Image (tube, rainbow, N blue to C red):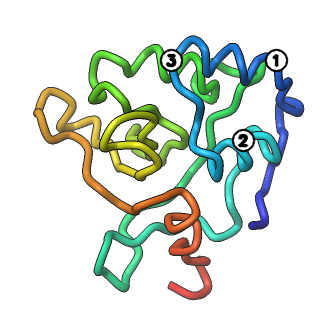
Amino acid sequence: MDVEDSNKYGAIKLDELEQFEKDIGARLPEDYRSFLILHNGGTPEKYLVCWPGAHEPAEVWNDSLGLHNGPTYSRLDSVTEGLKEYLPKGIIPFASDPGGNFFCIGISGDYFGKIYFWDHERAQEKESCSFLAGSFTEFVAGLVAEEDA
């Protein structure tokens, strides 16, 4: 996958990744973990997201979160901490859209490895996360380039 602004705030430090995993009590799914190690933020060149079963993009992957010393709004640790009271236990954010919503990944239980969309306007509702894909790999494979939309 081609990513714009890969490692924008510097490459990830493996000890920081391991500490983050310790803090959240889980090892990240391997496909997402590999993406984080390679890119530590950035935006895929194919950034439009289709809902399951849809053929037209409806969401935009705006910016990936990373483990770095950049702005808190783009830091995986900061955003995870800030959203933990809103997201179901076992789900953490990994990227944002332009409207304050987040793409999330399951890190435990039945959620593990699956991709969800968290809608901030439904934050107080029990079902604020909607299923998008069975894995990070599947999610990325379904991304659409703007010229193909």
Q: Categorize mark 2 by other alpha carbons within 10 Å: few (<14), some (14-19), many (20+).
A: many
Instruction: Mark 1 and mark 2 in contact? Answer it, CB < 8 Å.
Output: no
Disc with the residue nearer the chain's start (1 vs 2)? 1
Q: Label 2: state its secondary structure.
A: helix
Q: CA distance from mark 1 to mark 2?
A: 13 Å
| Residue identifier under label 3 | 25
Label 3: which secondary element: loop
In the rendered structure, find residue 78 and report the number of the disc placed on it: none
Q: Is residue 140 above or below residue 64?
A: below
Q: Position of residue 32 (x, y in %)?
A: 62, 47
Q: From what the image shows, is residue 91 above or below residue 49? A: above
Task: Tell me the residue that label 1 is attached to.
Answer: 15
Q: Are marks 2 and 3 in contact (CB under 8 Å)?
A: no
For residue 7, which quarter of the picture? top right
Q: How many marks?
A: 3
Q: Is residue 84 left or right of residue 6?
A: left
- The amino acid on which the numbered mark 3 sits, given as a three-letter code, is Gly
The residue pinned by badge 2 equals: 36
